[in-house]
Image (spheres, rainbow, N blue to C red):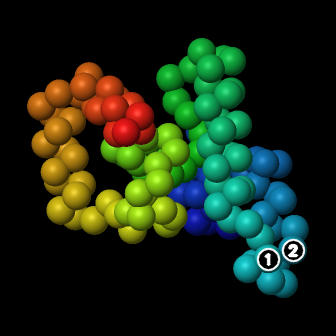
Amino acid sequence: MYIQKTFLCATNSNSLSPKHFPAIVNVDNPRQMNWARHVCNFLLDGITEMRRKNSKGVEGCVFAMLIIYLHETHFGEYSGDDEARPPWISYWRGDTLKERLKLEKKDSTGLLSQAKQRKEK
């Protein structure tokens, strides 16, 4: 419960939300739960709510959002590269993250166009 509330499906409030309940209904076998889908759906709902309410904070796993951002801007939306296959986090090691941070500092506007160019090739 604590990990889900504070990390995987973080919210802006201090109390549990009804959004957390589907993941805890069947505690007999947590491996049956599709945690990746649950975390991504929670994040997507949080982004939708943020846009609807025009708020400055988003509910959901910010680390999942970071991995999606890094992957999409580096490989493009749908890449056939072997490196780009799931799990995406396996590509983003310390050395690749450091290199990416250098690129972000240098030219953050050109990163999306680079990803689009890779996608078109």
Q: Where is residue 32 in the image (x, y as percent from the top left)?
A: 79, 77
Q: What residue type is labelled 2?
A: Asn
Q: Check the image and report above or below for 45 versus 60.
A: above
Q: Where is residue 66 in the image (x, y as percent from the top left)?
A: 42, 46
Q: How crowded is mark 1: few (under 14 residues within 10 Å), some or many (20 or more)?
A: few
Q: In this view, does 39 lie to the left or right of 24?
A: left
Q: Mark 1–mark 2 contact, CB under 8 Å?
A: yes
At horizontal 47% and vertical 54% (from top left) the residue drawn is 80
Front residue (pair 55, 88): 88
Q: Position of residue 69 (x, y in %)?
A: 42, 41
Residue 40 seen in this snapshot: yes
Q: Position of residue 12 (x, y in %)?
A: 59, 39
Q: Quadrant of the N terminus?
A: bottom right
At horizontal 28% and vertical 65% (from top left) the residue drawn is 93
Q: Nearer the viewer, mark 1 or mark 2?
A: 1
At horizontal 24% and vertical 55% (from top left) the residue drawn is 97
- Element at badge 2? loop
Q: Check the image and report above or below for 1 versus 100.
A: below
Name the residue beneath numbered marker 2.
26
At horizontal 18% and vertical 62% (from top left) the residue drawn is 95
Front residue (pair 114, 8): 114
Q: Which residue lies furthest to the front in this view?
A: 121
Front residue (pair 90, 64): 90
Residue 32: give its label: 1
Front residue (pair 26, 14): 26
Q: Check the image and report above or below for 3 versus 108.
A: below
Q: Which amino acid does label 1 sit on?
A: Gln
Q: Is residue 115 left or right of residue 58?
A: left
Q: Check the image and report above or below for 114 versus 92.
A: above
